[in-house]
């Protein structure tokens, strides 16, 4: 019965969507059908992306544009390189234009409450993409690679990489985290520390600088120059005589900045972790410099997001595989979590076998 009702509504919706500029009609369809009622198959879908702090965001832009269009939707895909204010305006304008779903990769997950509430009030569904939206109940779903698991994999890789170079500790390490406004940064760090903290406590690992807190390890704006500067300072303050064995880096851009700093100081390269499978880092891994990265294939994440949009369009419930992990401070956001994969030189060929760009680098 429900399916018939949904089909009827979808048909009504299709008819309506042919009228250009019938904003009020669209709005009433949205509110009368609610979150489970579906919407016209050629509706506008808004995608609000943060700053281009890593390659995955640039890839996401193109994939969302192409794949939403291929699925029959109208796509409004925007970056907010100007910062939080720009992202707030973009989301507000997507709401005004009548977007039925708004997909948000937030610069600062705690600063978009007003805009996503406006989206909900207008009958749209809000999906947090890659980064969670915090302290708001106006977020329906979360789709991301499991961020805590990313950190766990990084922590394990750091230990394994150092062990391969030097079988027994203690090991001297330093810790880097991502941008504190990005909700993922703390989760990555906590995941890594779930592995590293016990080893710090038992003396296997020594953070020579003493900077073990997230607030001390953060890298504002995920900016390479900030990580490089901090590494310069750490090297001169704590490694005049001590050897640096490893660095926890939360992503590839920062990993390369950290290695640049170490090279400039004419020190031997430590084991450095990463994330995102950026081209330059995959090259570095193959050259034996950066130790590891994480494969979070953006194509799959965008595909899952669009599958959610398609389910919503039909009035169906999108796929959710986790309803307990991502509490945003106000609610536990139902999530579709994908599995991240650790990549080192040893498994790079296999890991990127179906990636046309990266597979060329592992031959
Ligand atoms: C995170 C994302 C990472 C990395 C970082 C910097 O939120 O999950 O993959 O790209 O942003 O852009």
Image (cartoon, rainbow, N blue to C red):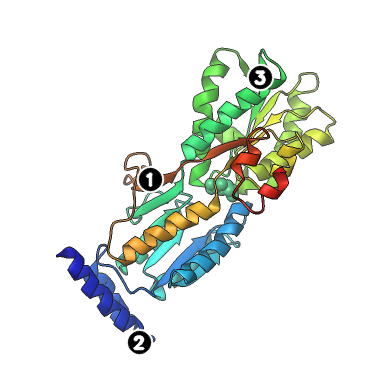
Tell me the crowding category of disc 2: few under 14, some 14 to 19, or many 20 or more residues within 10 angstroms, Cα based: few
Instruction: Tell whether label 1 touches label 2 (CB within 8 Å).
Output: no
Q: Residue at x 46, y 48 (%)?
A: 144
Residue 196 vs 149, above or below: the answer is above
Question: Circle 1 is placed at which residue position?
Answer: 328
Image-based side of 34 in relation to 210, left or right: left
Residue 204, image x, y percentages: 61, 14
Image-based side of 120 in relation to 354, left or right: left
Q: Is residue 292 visible?
A: yes
Question: Circle 3 is placed at which residue position?
Answer: 163
* SS of the residue under disc 3: helix
Tell me the crowding category of disc 3: few under 14, some 14 to 19, or many 20 or more residues within 10 angstroms, Cα based: some
* SS of the residue under disc 1: loop
Earlier in the chain: of badge 3 and badge 2, it is 2
Q: Residue at x 54, y 62 (%)?
A: 63
Earlier in the chain: of badge 3 and badge 1, it is 3
The picture quadrant where one finds residue 256 is: top right
* Total marks placed: 3
Q: Residue at x 67, y 12 (%)?
A: 168
Earlier in the chain: of badge 2 and badge 1, it is 2
Q: Residue at x 36, y 44 (%)?
A: 329
Question: Circle 2 is placed at which residue position?
Answer: 19
* Front tag of 2 and 1: 2
Q: CA distance from mark 3 to mark 1?
A: 37 Å
Tell me the crowding category of disc 1: few under 14, some 14 to 19, or many 20 or more residues within 10 angstroms, Cα based: some
* Front tag of 3 and 1: 3
Q: CA distance from mark 3 to mark 2?
A: 65 Å
* SS of the residue under disc 2: loop
Image-based side of 39 in relation to 259, left or right: left
Q: Is residue 53 visible?
A: no
């Amino acid at each position: 019965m429900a399916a018939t009702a949904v089909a009827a509504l979808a048909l009504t919706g299709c008819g309506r969507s042919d009228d250009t500029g019938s904003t009020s009609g669209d709005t009433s369809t949205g509110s009368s059908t609610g979150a489970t009622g579906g919407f016209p198959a050629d509706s506008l879908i808004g995608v609000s992306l943060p700053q281009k702090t890593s390659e995955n965001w640039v890839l996401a832009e193109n994939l969302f544009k192409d794949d939403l269009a291929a699925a029959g939707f109208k796509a409004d895909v925007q970056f907010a390189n100007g910062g939080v204010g720009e992202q707030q305006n973009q989301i507000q304008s997507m709401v005004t234009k009548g977007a039925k779903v708004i997909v948000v990769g937030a610069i600062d997950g705690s600063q978009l409450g007003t805009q996503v509430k406006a989206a909900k009030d207008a009958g749209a569904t809000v999906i947090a993409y890659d980064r969670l939206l915090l302290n708001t109940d106006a977020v329906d779903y979360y789709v991301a690679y499991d961020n805590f698991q990313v950190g766990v994999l990084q922590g394990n890789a750091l230990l394994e990489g150092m062990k391969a170079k030097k079988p027994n500790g203690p090991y001297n390490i330093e810790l880097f985290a991502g941008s504190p406004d990005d909700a993922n940064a703390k989760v990555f760090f906590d995941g890594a520390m779930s592995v590293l903290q016990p080893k710090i406590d038992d003396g296997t690992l020594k953070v020579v600088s003493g900077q073990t807190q997230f607030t001390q390890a953060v890298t504002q704006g995920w900016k390479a120059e900030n990580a490089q500067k901090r590494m310069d300072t750490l090297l001169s303050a704590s490694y005049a005589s001590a050897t640096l064995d490893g660095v926890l880096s939360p992503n590839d851009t920062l990993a390369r900045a950290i290695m640049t700093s170490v090279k400039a100081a004419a020190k031997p390269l430590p084991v450095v972790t990463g994330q995102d499978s950026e081209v330059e880092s995959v090259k570095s891994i193959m050259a034996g410099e950066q130790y590891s990265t994480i494969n979070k294939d953006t194509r799959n994440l965008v595909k899952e997001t669009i599958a959610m949009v398609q389910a919503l369009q039909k009035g169906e419930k999108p796929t959710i595989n986790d309803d307990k992990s991502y509490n945003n401070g106000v609610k536990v956001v139902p999530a579709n979590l994908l599995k991240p994969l650790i990549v080192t030189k040893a498994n790079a060929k296999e890991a990127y076998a179906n990636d046309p760009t990266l597979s060329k680098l592992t031959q």
